[in-house]
Image (cartoon, rainbow, N blue to C red):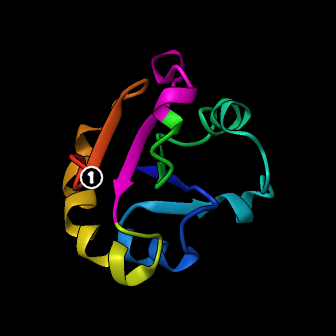
Amino acid sequence: MRLLLDENLPRGLKRHLRPHTVLTVQEMGWNGIKNGHLLIRAQAEFQALVTIDGNMIYQQHVATFAIGLVVLHAPSNDMNDLLPLVADILGELPNVKPGEVVHVGDWGR
């Protein structure tokens, strides 16, 4: 699966998501692009966008995009807070479908 890491996540997270092909927003040269335009661009090249931006689901009508959204719920975007989610991320990736949102972590916050 081809994954795009949002710019709000540390680049080092990508090495923990193998065997998936993971690129970052920065590597794509898409820094600073607003969420709607980012989803439009990403849907052409990726199956899912991984983000910690929980507001994205309220700002964008994800169902209209041909890309899945994986929203991480952690205390911060620090690697120490994200690493405990890696097994769950990898476990949920097969469930990601275009236009759908998958939540990983403590969604009840």
- Residue 67: image location, x then y, percent: 49, 32
Q: Which residues are magenta?
A: 57-74
Per the image, the residue denoted by label 1 is 104
Residue 82 covered by magenta stretch: no
Tell me what residue is drawn at x 36 percent, y 84 percent. 80
- Residue 38, by quadrant, is top right
The percent coordinates of residue 78 (x first, y second) are: 46, 78
Residue in the picture at 18% in, 55% down:
91
User: Residue 7: x and y, percent?
Assistant: 64, 61
Q: Is residue 61 above or below residue 58?
A: above
Asked if residue 8 lies left or right of residue 104, the reply is: right
Amino acid type for the residue under numbered disc 1: Val
Label tally: 1
Is residue 67 located in the magenta-colored stretch of the structure?
yes
Q: Is residue 18 visible?
A: no
Give me the residue at 81% from left, 58% from top.
Answer: 29
From the viewer's side, name the closer residue of 66 and 59. Answer: 59
Q: Is residue 97 above or below residue 14?
A: above
